[in-house]
Amino acid sequence: MSDRLALDNLVRSRLKQWPQRPPGLKQRPGQNAWLRCRPSADSKQVHPFLKLPGSNNWRTLPDGLWLNFGGTPEDPFVDIFAIEACSTTQNLLDKRSRFAPSTHSMLAFCPIPWLLAPVTPGDPTPRWRITGIFREQPTQPATLPVREMRVLYGLKSRDYTGFIRTQLAHAHEFFMPLETLTEENSEQNPALRALVKRASITANFLRC
């Protein structure tokens, strides 16, 4: 348990260095705004989480979570980029099941303290202003439908090697060794940035 806790802490400490938009992911055309939700620079702050409609108990709290707010105040949505660090194969299977294709719509719940808080310690702009989906300061939490998702799984080297040899990734899934994810300045790694860049929905279209 102590090894897993140490790994979780290492992953979160590295992801705190990642920017508000996942590294390598280009800004998409139209109204959109990326914000990093997990992990936060303030460990005491409440965070957004993912849930199913009508569920108060079932929550998904990825190790890393970015929301891309889009749409209009009348018809808002979010796209998500999540990172899950998997210490064992069983841990991977459990986390994959949470993001498996479903007939249910996934929702992103944004607590009001998180929406009102500054974007970063160096930028006092409240997050709700960045999203572009609020006409005025919100007074209630926001529950937004997830339009599309991309999930990056970090696996220990032995599990990563075995997975790519025997398994097939779903369209929304991306995989990498945990050692690369947790290395110092991982957000600047060219190979990692290239992988995240392919996670953009714009990668599905011809760019002339």
Image (tube, rainbow, N blue to C red):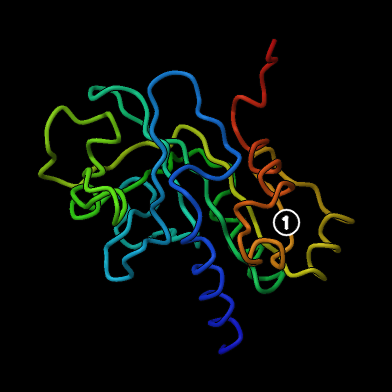
Q: Position of residue 143 (x, y in %)?
A: 28, 42
How many numbered discs, if any? 1
Residue of label 1? 176
Pick the front one: 160 or 91? 160
Identify the residue shown where x is 60% and y is 53%.
187
| Quarter occupied by the N terminus | bottom right
Left or right? Give the position of 117 relative to 196: left
Identify the residue shown where x is 37% and y is 34%.
69
| Quarter occupied by the C terminus | top right
In the rendered view, tell whether residue 171 sits above or below residue 96.
Answer: above
Left or right? Give the position of 73 relative to 32: left
Q: Residue 140: name its quadrant.
A: top left
Q: Residue 56: name its quadrant.
A: bottom left
* Local crowd size for mark 1, using a 10 Å CA cut-off: few (<14), some (14–19), many (≥20): some
Q: Position of residue 188 (x, y in %)?
A: 63, 51
Identify the residue shown where x is 66% and y is 73%.
87
Extreme residue in the right direction:
165
Left or right? Give the position of 180 relative to 48: right
In the rendered view, tell whether residue 85 sits above or below residue 35.
Answer: below
In the rendered view, tell whether residue 154 sits above or below residue 168.
Answer: below
Extreme residue in the bottom direction:
2
Amino acid of disc 1: Met
Left or right? Give the position of 38 relative to 48: right
Q: Position of residue 37 (x, y in %)?
A: 38, 53
Identify the residue shown where x is 41% and y is 50%.
36
